[in-house]
Image: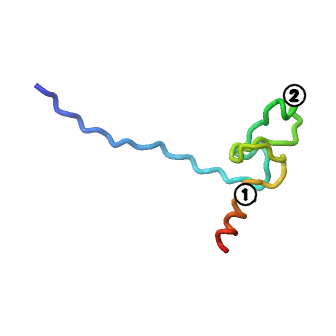
Amino acid sequence: MTSPKRPTKPKTRPAAEPAAPMPDFCGFQCPHSAFPPADTAGLCRTMAAVYCKKLKRLVAKNGPCVWKKKSAAGKRRAEK
């Protein structure tokens, strides 16, 4: 004797968190920032650079967002 199959619930994905707005300047308030490796920043952590996870490289702390600058330049080229 076989048991009847139970109806299955449709699989739902958890609600995605709204994307945080990209700040205009690079710093630790950016969701894509991280502390740079200790060998590049020094042990005292008085660094002048931030590791950007989006660009996968060091960028100047408190400088204009390099990723925004690159994406804006790409949009301008696409419009031409």
What's the residue at 75%, 45% (across, down)? 29
Circle 1: residue type: Lys
What's the residue at 79%, 46% (across, down)? 27
Circle 2: residue type: Leu
x, y percentage for residue 15? 49, 46
Residues 66 and 26: in front is 66
Circles 1 and 2: CB atoms closer than 8 Å: no
What label sits on residue 43 in the rendered view? 2
x, y percentage for residue 75? 67, 66
Residues 57 and 51: in front is 57
Where disc 2 sits, the SS reads: loop
| Mark toward the start of the polypeptide (1 vs 2) | 2
x, y percentage for residue 31? 69, 45
What's the residue at 44%, 43% (across, down)? 13
Pick out the residue farthest to the left. Answer: 1
- Which quadrant would residue 68 be assigned to in this image? bottom right
Pick out the residue farthest to the bottom. Answer: 80
x, y percentage for residue 74? 68, 63
- Which quadrant would residue 49 be assigned to in this image? top right
Name the quadrant of the N terminus: top left
Left or right, 3 with respect to 53, comes to left
Left or right, 31 with respect to 50, comes to left
What's the residue at 77%, 56% (across, down)? 24
Check the image and report above or below for 78 versus 1.
below
- Which quadrant would residue 11 be assigned to in this image? top left
Q: Which residue is mark 1?
A: 68
